């Protein structure tokens, strides 16, 4: 029985991994096709109208634009797999060097937001389930619905107006560099991290509440109540562990959003992350950087979704203890 159980879990995990790789391949193809479909000639757009035909043709050969699209796609994808992301057309620097520091900044901002949002969301979800249908629960529900309804840029500008312009507590521009201390970086990213926290925390809190309330109607919870166990103990020690699968899934999905959904927040706060680099590269028509940034965002999102699926499979009591 244990052997069959382990085989079942391994088969599900392998299936999710294969689907993830297939999805990443399809997304890479869509990114390449989307860039190819852009109007105009990249070489002429970069060199300008004053460039001669010979110069444009030489530049096209340098960019391998004279090759068939299929050959260029597999050459680009093969280089990406090997860690060769190419060279930026805007400044001639290796794209890996440009993306390394920017991606680290994006992960730093998303991590700070996650460290705040996840514990608060779980605690508030447990509290809402514990006191469901009370005034406290209704206030949390209305507040979370409001947070979900507001777009990121609106929330960001509200926080800037309040904490930067009116109170002057935090800077409105989250400009960080490698020479800054950890405390200085934290002070600089307070507002963008708070923006992301408010956006994702509400969804995680509502899902946690719904998952726990669904478990509370189970027979073993009714048995625990009949034994006279404290309600807080029933919710925390009995209901919550059995609601981990959907809770872990929604937390991992929101963590994926924190990484790939920071583009708007980074632009609003002029934060030197991967999202800001992507927007700047689009305006400069720096196509290799746009392709690499888009594929890194896609790979990160797919990886975190895979982690969510795997953790949901492992934490599912029906799969861990099949009958």
Image: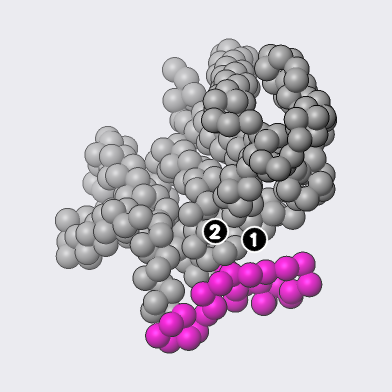
Does the stretch in magenta take in 184? yes
Does the stretch in magenta take in 28? no
Instruction: Tell which of 140 and 200 is nearer to you.
Output: 200
The prevailing secondary structure element of the residues shown in magenta is: loop
The residue carrying pointer 2 sits among few (fewer than 14), some (14 to 19) or many (20 or more) residues within 10 Å by Cα, namely many
The residue carrying pointer 1 sits among few (fewer than 14), some (14 to 19) or many (20 or more) residues within 10 Å by Cα, namely many
Give the image quarter of residue 214. Answer: top left
Residue occupying image coordinates x 54% and y 25%: 37
Q: Which of marks 1 and 2 is nearer the N terminus?
A: 2
Rendering coords of residue 109 (x, y %) = 59, 60
| Residue highlighted by disc 2 | 266
Query: Which numbered dot is residue 50?
Result: none
In the picture, measured across the screen, residue 158 lies left or right of residue 45, that is left
Residue occupying image coordinates x 53% and y 59%: 267
Rendering coords of residue 305 (x, y %) = 53, 34
Q: Where are the magenta residues, as a range?
A: 164-189
């Amino acid at each position: 029985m244990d052997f069959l159980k382990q085989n079942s879990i391994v088969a599900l995990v392998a299936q999710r991994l294969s689907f993830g790789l297939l999805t990443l391949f399809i997304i890479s193809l869509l990114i390449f096709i989307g860039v190819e479909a852009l109007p105009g000639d990249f070489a002429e757009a970069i060199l300008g109208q004053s460039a001669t035909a010979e110069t444009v043709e030489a530049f096209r050969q340098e960019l391998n634009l004279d090759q068939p699209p299929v050959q260029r796609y597999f050459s680009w994808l093969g280089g990406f797999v090997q860690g060769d992301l190419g060279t930026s057309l805007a400044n001639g620097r290796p794209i890996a060097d440009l993306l390394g520091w920017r991606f680290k900044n994006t992960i730093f901002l998303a991590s700070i937001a996650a460290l705040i949002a996840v514990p608060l969301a779980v605690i508030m979800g447990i509290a809402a389930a514990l006191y469901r249908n009370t005034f406290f629960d209704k206030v949390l529900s209305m507040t979370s619905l409001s947070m979900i309804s507001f777009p990121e840029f609106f929330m960001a500008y509200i926080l800037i107006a309040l904490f930067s312009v009116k109170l002057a507590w935090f800077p409105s521009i989250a400009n960080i560099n490698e020479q800054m201390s950890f405390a200085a970086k934290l002070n600089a990213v307070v507002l963008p991290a708070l923006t992301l926290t408010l956006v994702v925390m509400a969804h995680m809190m509502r899902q946690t509440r719904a998952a726990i309330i669904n478990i509370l109607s189970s027979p073993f919870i009714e048995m625990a109540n009949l034994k006279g166990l404290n309600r807080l103990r029933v919710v925390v020690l009995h209901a919550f562990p059995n609601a981990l699968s959907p809770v872990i899934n929604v937390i991992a999905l929101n963590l994926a959003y924190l990484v790939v959904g920071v583009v708007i927040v980074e632009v609003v706060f002029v934060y030197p992350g991967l999202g800001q680099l992507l927007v700047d590269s689009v305006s400069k028509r720096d196509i290799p950087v746009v392709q690499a940034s888009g594929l890194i965002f896609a790979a990160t999102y797919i990886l975190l979704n895979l982690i969510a699926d795997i953790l949901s499979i492992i934490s599912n009591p029906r799969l861990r203890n099949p009958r």
